[in-house]
Image: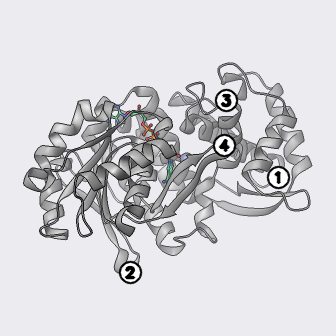
């Protein structure tokens, strides 16, 4: 772990993927350098911005100014929210890019959170059989997670992210000042993914977060540091296992439990993704403790930190409540294949010591959930 850099120094994290390697540029104010960076990467290319209406209100003109002449294509503005990861909006976005005369050799700029990043990335993957794209993530979740790694997708009526492609961006520009306008609840939800990197493989980072999280929230240099450490962890994992045949699965810590809670709450404002992941990580550590893998005191350290930043850590905190353990198990089984009553979970032997456990007994998870649902905060 390195010491936080001065606020004025952009931090560059490289995602090493051979000829498809790219940089993540992190810093306050780096949006202004977008056009210059694109001009170096793709001289002569034009760029079309895809964004949502909320982000457009805050940052479209700044992004257009940063692109200058290369950004003269009409911006493609979709409604905010998960609903835009639909076939209908996707079709409209693809046609709009063609209308804007974006050719092979030109670029798409995804200016927004994970919704815009996933949608624009997938459009870039297929329009004219593949266009390069740049991620300009504007939520904390997008800056530390969804803009890096090349997973792009829209949703099916059968479930989230079922239609998509692996398509790596050619550049990620993460301007941490853009997070100043993010609603606090969205910032907190994204923070769950930051804490996740500490819990997976970096105990020192988790300890640093425990001491410095307030500065990460308030936007000082600690914010850049936390985002850079998170991006480094994701970049390393993605470069070793781009298509998730092994190690990349560790990034799903808290996500098997979390997805079930999210689905049970109807993917609604009742429980944001990061909030579900906070509950999921608490469950992954509590379940690891129940199996004797990790001391219960360490699982409690995890829960206490997430609670300190204001994330939910008890299932009873979910607005409107959760269904019973049978129903949650059904949702887990839909999300993950159950092989002869066994499930794969990401469990932990310590903070920073997550591992893939392919042999978890479904019945054991069920009784654990019964206990967790009975707990009050
Ligand atoms: N591709 C991946 O690897 C990956 C990983 C994790 C999540 N995801 C996807 O990411 C999506 C969630 O992303 P998200 O949490 O960023 O949600 P989001 O994109 O819906 O953004 C959340 C809300 O914040 C608003 N917003 C965005 N930036 C803002 C800013 N700077 N100031 C004010 N408001 C702002 C948006 O308009 C939206 O209303 C999900 O669809 C999920 O499936 C993808
Ligand atoms: Zn997540």
Q: Earlier in the sequence, mark 1 or mark 3?
A: 3
Task: Tell me what residue is drawn at x 50 percent, y 36 percent.
Answer: 83
Q: Earlier in the sequence, mark 2 or mark 1?
A: 2
Disc 3 to disc 2: CB gap under 8 Å: no
Residue 195 image offset from top left, x and y in percent: 52, 46
* Residue neighbourhood size for the residue with mark 1, other residues' Cα within 10 Å, grouped as few (<14), some (14–19), many (≥20): few
Above/below status of 368 relative to 251? above
Which label was assigned to residue 259?
Answer: 4
Colour approach in the figure: one colour
Which label was assigned to residue 18?
Answer: 2
Q: Secondary structure at mark 4?
A: helix
Residue pointed to by mark 1: 292
The residues tagged by marks 2 and 4 sit, at their Cα atoms, a distance apart of: 33 Å
Residue pointed to by mark 3: 265
List the single residue furthest toward the bottom: 18
The residues tagged by marks 1 and 3 sit, at their Cα atoms, a distance apart of: 30 Å
Q: Earlier in the sequence, mark 4 or mark 3?
A: 4
Q: Image quadrant of residue 258?
A: top right
């Amino acid at each position: 772990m390195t010491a936080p850099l001065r606020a004025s120094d952009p931090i560059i994290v490289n995602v090493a993927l051979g000829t498809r390697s790219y940089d993540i540029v992190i810093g306050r104010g780096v949006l202004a350098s977008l056009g210059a960076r694109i001009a170096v990467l793709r001289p002569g290319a034009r760029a079309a911005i895809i964004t949502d209406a909320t982000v457009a209100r805050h940052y479209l003109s700044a992004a257009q100014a940063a692109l200058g002449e290369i950004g003269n294509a009409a911006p493609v503005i979709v409604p905010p929210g998960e609903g835009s990861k639909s076939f209908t909006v996707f079709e409209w976005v693809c046609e709009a890019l063609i209308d804007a005369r974006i050719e092979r050799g030109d670029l798409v700029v995804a200016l927004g959170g994970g919704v815009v990043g996933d949608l624009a990335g997938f459009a870039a993957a297929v329009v004219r059989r593949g266009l390069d794209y740049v991620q300009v993530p504007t939520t904390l979740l997008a800056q530390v997670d969804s803009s890096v790694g090349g997973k792009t997708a829209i949703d099916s009526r059968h479930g989230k992210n079922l239609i998509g492609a692996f398509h790596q961006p050619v550049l990620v520009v993460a301007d941490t000042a853009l997070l100043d306008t993010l609603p606090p609840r969205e910032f907190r939800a994204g923070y769950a993914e930051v804490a996740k990197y500490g819990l997976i493989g970096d105990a020192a980072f988790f300890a640093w977060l425990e001491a410095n999280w307030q500065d990460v929230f308030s936007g000082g240099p600690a914010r850049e540091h936390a985002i850079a450490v998170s991006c480094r962890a994701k970049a390393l994992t993605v470069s070793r296992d781009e298509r998730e045949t092994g190690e990349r699965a560790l990034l799903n810590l808290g996500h098997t439990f979390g997805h079930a809670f999210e689905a049970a709450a109807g993917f609604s404002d009742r429980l944001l993704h990061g909030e579900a992941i906070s509950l999921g990580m608490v469950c992954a550590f509590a379940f690891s403790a129940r199996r004797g893998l990790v001391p219960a005191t360490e699982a409690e350290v995890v829960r206490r930190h997430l609670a300190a930043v204001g994330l939910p850590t008890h299932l009873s905190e979910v607005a409107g409540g959760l269904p019973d353990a049978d129903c949650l198990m059904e949702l887990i089984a839909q999300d993950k294949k159950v092989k002869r009553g066994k499930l794969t979970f990401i469990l932990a032997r310590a903070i920073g010591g997550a591992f893939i456990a392919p042999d978890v007994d479904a019945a054991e998870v069920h009784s654990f959930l019964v206990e967790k649902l009975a707990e009050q905060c």
